[in-house]
Structure formats: C-alpha cells, structure tokens
Amino acid sequence: MTASGSYLIPSFQRARVGDAMRAGVISCPPDSSMRDVARIMTTNHVHAVVVRGVADGGAWGVVTDRDLLRVATRAEDQNAGACASEVLVTVAPHEPLEVACAMAAALIVPESEPARFSSAAA
C-alpha cells in the first residue's frame, strides 16, 4: 500500500470511520462470563462486545479488551453485565477516521467512570 492508499484501502487522510468498522454487532447476554466474552472477541477478531440487557435498567453496555485485562485473573468469576459500561462515545461511519482518532486521543475519563469508544451507524 502506498501513502495514497489503494483501490481496496484508502489512505489514512481519506479514510472514513466506516472503512475501519466491522459490519454488524457482536453481542452477548449479561450473564456471560468474561472468559466467554474473551472467546467471543477472539473468534470474531474484535476488541469490544455489546452486552444486551445490562443491570440497572440499561438497555445495553459494552465490554472492551481493557475490561478483560482488568479482570483477567478472575475472568471465570466475573460476568459481562457487571463489567460492562453504559458510557459510550460514538462516531458516525461517514466521519473522517482522523476525527475519530483525535477524539479517542483527547478522551479523558476518570478511572471511576470508564468510557468506551465505538463507531455507530448514523
């Protein structure tokens, strides 16, 4: 690939969030063990899984690979619903990839309230 990209992959400067997205949503129920979440991520080559029906009245949450690292030594005893965050920053697929990267780099979140960064359909 050259600096200008190829017919399959645009250059970073011309790329849109949709160019880097995986189609579809990978999800799990809230009672899934974090070990099962790790398997889902590995099988689907993703870094985050949507958790359906999270406790506290939330419709959904997100578990990331960072969450897995945080509970790695006790992954079998933790479930996705307890580890999921409902705080999520989204970016539309038509936005420039540079904008999404700048947003992720500028995202400052207290450890007590972790946020997840994801792309979302407009």
Image (spheres, helix red, strand yellow):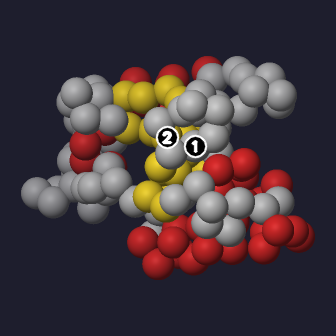
Q: Residue at x 15, y 60 (%)?
A: 8
The correct choice, above or below, for 36 with respect to 84 in the image is below
Task: Please tell me whether mark 2 sits on a helix, a strand or a loop.
Answer: strand
The correct choice, above or below, for 46 with respect to 10 in the image is below
Instruction: Please indicate, yes or no, whether residue 3 appears anywhere in the rendered image.
Output: no
Judging depth in this view, the residue of 1 and 85 nearest the camera is: 85
Judging depth in this view, the residue of 29 and 84 nearest the camera is: 29
Residues at marks 1 and 2, CA–CA distance in whole angstroms: 5 Å
Judging depth in this view, the residue of 103 and 38 nearest the camera is: 38
Q: Position of residue 30 (x, y in %)?
A: 59, 55
Q: Which residue is mark 1?
A: 54
Q: Residue at x 63, y 61 (%)?
A: 31
Q: Position of residue 93 (x, y in %)?
A: 25, 35
Quadrant containing the C terminus in the rendered view? top left
Mark 1 vs 2: CB contact within 8 A: yes
Q: Residues within 10 Å of mark 2 (few under 14, many from 20)?
A: some
Q: Residues within 10 Å of mark 1 (few under 14, many from 20)?
A: many
Amino acid carrying label 1: it is Val
**Does label 1 or label 2 sit earlier along the sequence?**
1
Horizontal relation, residue 68 to residue 85: left or right: right
The correct choice, above or below, for 54 with respect to 69 in the image is above
Q: Which residue is mark 2?
A: 60
Horizontal relation, residue 89 to residue 35: left or right: left
The correct choice, above or below, for 20 with respect to 121 in the image is below
Task: Please tell me whether mark 1 sits on a helix, a strand or a loop.
Answer: loop
Q: Which quarter of the picture shows residue 44?
A: bottom left
Quadrant containing the N terminus in the rendered view? bottom left
Amino acid carrying label 2: it is Trp
Instruction: Please indicate, yes or no, whether residue 85 appears anywhere in the rendered image.
Output: yes
Q: Position of residue 112 (x, y in %)?
A: 83, 28
Q: Residue at x 64, y 45 (%)?
A: 84
